[in-house]
Amino acid sequence: MRKLLLGVVAMVALTSAAQAGWSPNGFSAGQCTFYCDGRTNEAGWKLTFSQNYGRDAYKWPSLVTNGWLYGWPWAGDVVVFDSQTGVPYGHVAYAESVNYAGNNEYDIVVTHMNWATGTIVRYVSGYAVRQATLRIYYRNNVLYGKFQGRTKEYKLKGFLGR
């Protein structure tokens, strides 16, 4: 019994260490914020926040102190979805690549977590990371995004970049 209990304790400690290592700012594993915090760090951009609480995805533009909010995307940016019906905390996704689609629209290949859109491309701390293409565009000076193959559009706040 002791060996089993010690094994479970060791597994929990290793999982916590792996999660802490992936998300330098300590976001909860499995959340979009956890993944984007770790993915930006993996790409060489360690995000810094003005506070360590209340860091919902849609609030990132006002909380990240070493990034700026842009109106057009670049690879390596964090795509920030606004708070809206069905997505009350917003959402963040990492822009892996950006392609101009014409007519002031862009296709962004994003990776993200905790949103069942796209193909699973890897696992981080046991949670699925999905890759999907997001078409972004402005309508009446408001930024929107729509995932490829989906009809629902989402209001975006913009793109956090360095």
Image (spheres, rainbow, N blue to C red):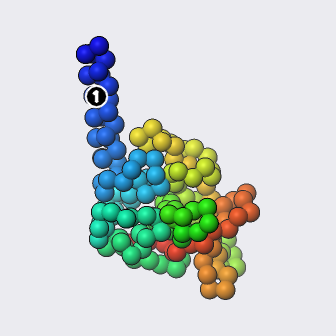
Q: Nearer the viewer, residue 135 or 154?
A: 154
Give the vertical position of 72 relative to 35 (above or below): below
Image quadrant of residue 142? Answer: bottom right
Residue 110, x across and y down, in percent:
55, 58
Give the quadrant of the N terminus.
Answer: top left
Q: Position of residue 117 (x, y in %)?
A: 62, 52
Label 1 environment density (alpha carbons within 10 Å; few <14, some 14–19, many ≥20): few
Residue placed under numbered mark 1 in the picture:
9
Residue 151: which quarter of the image?
Answer: bottom right
Residue most toward the top?
A: 1
Q: Which amino acid does the dot numbered 1 rest on?
A: Val
Q: How many callouts does the rendering have?
A: 1
Residue 137 seen by the camera: yes
In screen coordinates, is 27 left or right of 86? left
Give the left or right position of residue 149, taking residue 145 as reference.
right
Q: Quadrant of the C terminus?
A: bottom left
* Residue 131 appears in the picture as rendered: no
Residue 10 point in image, percent of width and height: 27, 28
Q: Position of residue 16 (x, y in %)?
A: 31, 40
Q: Nearer the viewer, residue 141 or 89?
A: 89
Residue at left offset 57%, top offset 52%: 115
> Residue at left 45%, top 38%?
126
Which residue is situated farthest in the bottom direction here?
Answer: 140
**Disc 1 on helix, strand or loop?**
helix
